[in-house]
Amino acid sequence: MLRVALIHDWLTGMRGGEKALEVFCEIFPDADLFTLVYLPGTTSPLIERRSVKRSAIQFLPFAGRLYRQYLPLFPIAVEQFDLDGYDLVISTSHCAAKSVVVTGRARHLCYCLTPMRYAWDQFDAYFGADRVGKLGNLLLRPMLAGLARWDRATEGRVHRYLAISQYVARRIALYYNRESTLVYPPVDTEFYSPEPAEPVQPQPKFLVVSALVPYKRVDLAMMAARQAGFGLTVVGNGPERANLERLAGDGIELAGWRTDEEIRDLYRTSIAAILPGEEDFGIVPVEAQACGRPVVALARGGALDTVIDGETGVLFGETTVESLAAALTRTAATSWDSATIRRRAERFSRSRFVDEIQHIVDDTLRAPAGSRW
């Protein structure tokens, strides 16, 4: 019997990476699940039913809320997972999960959400002097540089990398010097669908669904909507909420988190969803398109895999208020074909993901021990 272990960086919410993990749990119902930190009640029922094996970080003071503060301990913690009894290890990784230690007989597939951003190319977005102070910036810089060296040194612990977008495939090649197989993340295109009854007239508001963290550039969307004269609903929570509060008002609303059903209704009734920052893939654009609504997205990163300018949305070229505001105005003035947008989204279905993963697992297990792609 094939023994499978699933490794995830941390389980503290239900974002794109967790949605991929959820499908891995469906494919491998008997797999054991490992993570650095787990907050019960924050993920899906399918994940919640698992017996989750947690690292020692879980038991440090206030780890459930301040786990990111323990970043320097992640390498030690992830290397302590006991994976000796497993034949197949699958990590869903954007931080340290890809660096687990496996036995010589095991195969390790890494579904790479991205090489860790803050250690490689987005240090200032997370730890710039304007965010952590000059002293914090100076102290953290060498620590993150060391983390990047460790991340690069442990790339060989993975037998095969799976990239979530062409953009991430290029990052894997740049930082790990490894090839990867492109497997787009799963999107529940059965749940996210157009209004089944008489279509509802879209509200004169745009929509952002996002964790409120710096690189998501939610502030840009809020300022652009105000300049263009449109309302905006922002769904999500995160450490940037306090900073974003000052941009709210006059039709610009911070709505906190909402249920999947509420988010689906917002997709269906908004002018369009906005993806204001550079994303590794971006689940939100596909969910919105599955509901038949267009997307306004920065013309970089994963959005280039999911949004066709003029057909399923509008791509804007610069991370400026003026560029995004012009894109919002163009989107509102365009007559969109909901059926065409929906068909594009169906390319990213969960069933397609399951078929591709099963084929890759079979192919990987048939290869000689120690094979790397």
Image (cartoon, rainbow, N blue to C red):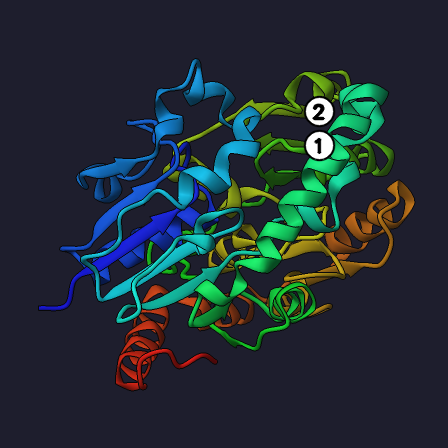
Residue 221 visible at all: no
235 sits left or right of 301 in the view: left
Q: Which residue lies at the image location 45% right of the left edge and 79% below the top edge? A: 372
Residue 231: image tag: 1
Residue 211 visible at all: yes
Give the farthest residue toward the left.
Answer: 1
The quarter of the picture where the N terminus appears is: bottom left
Q: Which residue lies at the image location 66% right of the left edge and 64% below the top edge? A: 171
Residue placed most toward the observer, 136 or 206 = 136
Q: Find residue 55 and report its horizontal and vertical position in percent.
A: 34, 34
Q: Which residue lies at the image location 76% right of the left edge and 61% below the top edge? A: 299
Q: Find residue 226 and report its horizontal and vertical position in percent.
A: 81, 31
The part of the image, by quadrant, that contains residue 35 is top left
Q: Tell me the crowding category of disc 2: few under 14, some 14 to 19, or many 20 or more residues within 10 angstroms, Cα based.
A: some
The part of the image, by quadrant, that contains residue 56 is top left
Q: Circles 2 and 1: CB distance less than 8 Å?
A: yes
Q: Which residue lies at the image location 72% right of the left edge and 68% below the top edge? A: 309
Work out whether 122 lies above or below 30. Answer: above
For the residues labelled 2 and 1, the Cα–Cα distance comes to 5 Å
Identify the amino acid type marked 2.
Gly
209 sits left or right of 274 in the view: left
Disc 1 element: strand
Question: To which residue does mark 2 refer?
Answer: 251
Work out whether 32 lies above or below 3. Answer: above
Q: Find residue 215 and report its horizontal and vertical position in percent.
A: 71, 40
Disc 2 element: loop
Identify the amino acid type marked 1.
Gly
Residue placed most toward the observer, 313 or 164 = 164
Q: Find residue 39 and report its horizontal and vertical position in percent.
A: 34, 27
Residue placed most toward the observer, 269 or 207 = 207
Work out whether 300 lies above or below 131. Answer: below
Give the farthest residue toward the right.
Answer: 322
